[in-house]
Image (cartoon, rainbow, N blue to C red):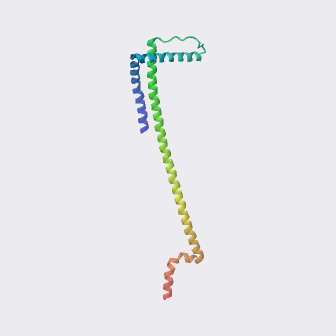
Amino acid sequence: MILPLAKLGTLALKTMSKPIAIRLKTEASRHPQFRQLIINLAQANHRISTNIQRRIYGHSTKVEIRPLNEEKAVQAAADLIGELFVFSVAGAAVIFEVQRSARSEARKEEARRNEVEALRQKEDQLAREIEIVKQKLGEIERQANSRGLSGVIFRSSSAPDQTKASRV
């Protein structure tokens, strides 16, 4: 029951993070100092991704890469911030789910250990009871050997009969 609710909650969290990411993008492009920071971030990202693409396709990487214009840089950085936010929310949800699952497994393992320990204790108790029964059986066998079989079987009832027989 909890697993479907947790998954549904995770999906709702991811869905709600998208409008927040859009809001972050719009606010990021308005603030002047943050705007300059994200422009620099976008230009660095553009240079890195262009170099990677050029290497993948086997082109020379020693050429000068033209920077993005300011509006494209702001839009690219805002998109990057939005995607990073959504990705971080999804990553946090995955980490939460893994930790929840690990705690559940730890509880199951602890229950298994307790069950095994209870079985060991029960085994020890049964072994002690078997020892007691063996001792009692050994005692009965010794008595049987010393008195004979009838002395063991009728020992409690034979004593009163002997006193009755001696009175007669």
Q: Residue at x 44, y 25 (%)?
A: 85
Image location (x, y in percent) of residue 138: 58, 69
Image: 11 above or below 124 = above
Image location (x, y in percent) of residue 51: 56, 16
**Quarter of the image holding residue 37?**
top left
Question: Across the whole image, how many numbered discs are drawn on residues?
Answer: 0
Q: In this orientation, which residue lies closer to the viewer: 44 or 161? A: 44
Looking at the rendering, in which quadrant would you find the N terminus?
A: top left
Q: Residue at x 41, y 35 (%)?
A: 5
Image: 147 above or below 1 = below
Image location (x, y in percent) of residue 66: 52, 10
Q: Which residue appears farthest toward the bottom when viewing the image?
A: 168
**Quarter of the image holding residue 22?**
top left
Q: Residue at x 49, y 42 (%)?
A: 105
Image: 164 above or below 80 = below
Image location (x, y in percent) of residue 119: 52, 54
